[in-house]
Amino acid sequence: QVQLVESGGGLVQAGGSLRLSCAASGRTASTYAMGWFRQAPGQEREFVAAITWGGGSTYYADSVKGRFTISRDNAKNTAYLQMNNLKPEDTAVYYCAAERWGNAATMTSAGMDYWGKGTLVTVSS
């Protein structure tokens, strides 16, 4: 129904920046809340950021507040995650996800309807 493809991951030094993109194809809609999650080796998948249908409100995990910014361009069916001041602990596979009629304020991994396959972000020190 909906395919999500992440891009923009790679290797970056601590303190650097990276911008992830999530391109949606198929039967997309602006009523999807979008979110980013990440999973480090040996760790559980954790919530990173979420954005409401129209992009008016954003939510972040405490660990990334002030450093990461989520945004979306519904006309382009694309969501973004701007990551600044990256830290080694940010190293993980980052996943884009969408939730139909979702509430971005209470977004959890279990509630998402569509997932991308992930893009690896590695932060060196």
Image: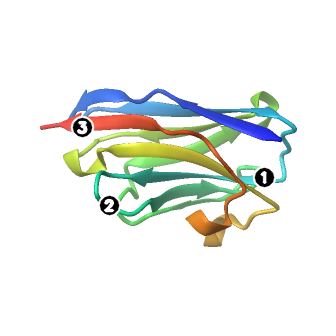
Q: Residue at x 46, y 27 (%)?
A: 8
Residue 22 lies in what quarter of the image? top right
Q: CA distance from mark 2 to mark 3?
A: 16 Å
Which residue is disc 2 drawn over?
43
- Looking at the picture, which amino acid does disc 3 mark? Val
Q: CA distance from mark 1 to mark 2?
A: 27 Å
Q: Residue at x 34, y 46 (%)?
A: 92
- Looking at the picture, which amino acid does disc 2 mark? Gln
Q: Residue at x 50, y 39 (%)?
A: 118
Q: Secondary structure at mark 3?
A: strand
Point out which mark residue 32 bears: 1
Q: Quadrant of the N terminus?
A: top right
Point out which mark residue 123 bears: 3
**Figure disc tally:** 3
Point out which mark residue 94 bears: none
Q: Residue at x 29, y 44 (%)?
A: 91
Provide residue 6's location: percent of width, then percent of height: 56, 33
For the question of whether residue 108 can be seen, the reply is: no
Residue 63 lies in what quarter of the image? bottom left
